[in-house]
Amino acid sequence: MNILVLNCGSSTIKFQLIATDLEEIAHNSDRRLARGDIERIGGESIVSLRAEGREPERSTATLRDARAALDLIVHWICSAESGIKEVQSVADIHAVGHRVVHGGEKFTHSVIIDDEVLRDIEKCIDLAPLHNPTNIKGIVAAREVFGAGLPQVAVFDTAFHQTLPEHAYLYALPYQFYRRHRIRRYGFHGTSHRYVAYRYRQLRGIARDATNVITLHLGNGCSIAAIRKGDSIDTSMGMTPLEGLVMGTRSGDIDAAIIDFIGAKEGLSSHEVETVLNKQSGLLGISGLTNDMRELLAEAHENNDRRARLAIEIFCYRARKYIGSFLAAMAGADAVIFTGGIGENSSEVRAKISAGLEWAGLQLDPERNAAHSGGKEGVISADGSSLAAYVIPTDEELLIARDTVRCVRGAPQRY
Ligand code: AMP
């Protein structure tokens, strides 16, 4: 089957076209036919498209909404100019898989989208007001472009963490807030944590229930998960993606009393303070320079900038502290896995996070660590390190395509 995987944001659409089926999944022979993204939808949009084995194409177009952007993508995929032999017309696209951010407590697995599912995704808007509406727009746009007959599947960022036990997902707030409003930890980046845990057990040739790892997704957004016997049993992001690790522009954990305090001192509403915590904090807030880790590292090396160094230090310290607490939460782990733009590419950040975890048996091999960037997968710990360390580049799109196939074929899902 040719699966169009869509990740629809507020002004962006990222897509991949993946050829896969139950047979391909079994043999790991899925094929990436094309990928691309459209940014700044709603104005003069930037379009990047790339078919397998070809040079990337970049252009601009005036695209008023998600529907117009999707029209452009589908038209390009089906055109002779893209050179994708497997897809000559819209009929050669067999299903669409969507990344959906929040599935609340309702969605523990991926599902075929029907009207009822769409209504349930709408019900989760309260929990993810920035993300779910744009995901829904993408689903509606795909229905318009392909017609209601084409199967569409929703793959939720929260679903993998639905195995968290009550003691890990409940906040110590009056219990009725959970009962009335479902205020609890949901966790995010679930598809990424799930993918790297799956790849780890493939690399090691072990079973799902022998998979005991801590996964760190370090990108612009950052989260960490404790995975015991294949299940997520704790994670750092909470009811929203704001909690936990230091991120590009998000603060991660803070004392909740600070919100009112800043509001009073700076004359900001609680909504405005929340925007500061989401958009002006984290690496950007501390450094005053950038949310981009690569630029911060360059600034620290080239100009010895104090606040750039401080931002990196706080980022790594928080991650190390979480690894320690998750080791306690899961009574020890076999490996720590790094993924995401920073986790996959920065040997320096990986080394800084791991330094001081020797007591837990984690010993990086400096040469192996330095050799892993740009999509290279493998072990970075020293032989004999009792807590191993891996770099595993994430591939959420592949899992979305595979889940889509399994849902459409009625095959059991593998989480
Ligand atoms: P993502 O959201 O997963 O695309 O990750 C984006 C983050 O990865 C940004 O902070 C980038 O600066 C960071 N990143 C990408 N490449 C590198 C690199 N070679 N060294 C350090 N950070 C990097």
Image: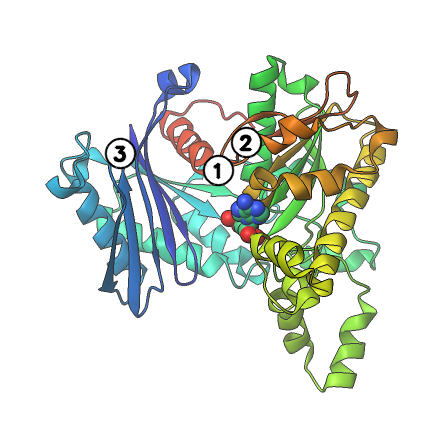
- Residue 84: x and y in percent read 19, 34
Q: Which residue is mark 3?
A: 94
Most distant residue in the top direction: 205
Question: Secondary structure beneath disc 1?
Answer: helix
329 relative position to 225: left or right: right
What label sits on residue 396 in the rendered view?
A: 1
Q: Amino acid at mark 1?
A: Glu
Which of disc 1 and disc 2 is earlier in sequence? 2
Q: Is residue 107 visible?
A: no
Distance of label 1 from label 3 (alpha carbons): 19 Å
Marks 2 and 1 close (CB-CB < 8 Å): yes
244 to 376, vertically: above or below = below
Q: Which residue is mark 2?
A: 195
Observer-side mark, 1 or 3, equals 1
- Residue 140: x and y in percent read 33, 55
Question: Secondary structure beneath disc 3?
Answer: loop
Q: Residues within 10 Å of mark 1 (few under 14, many from 20)?
A: many
Most distant residue in the left direction: 80
Q: Is residue 168 visible?
A: yes
398 to 235, vertically: above or below = above
Which of disc 3 and disc 2 is earlier in sequence? 3
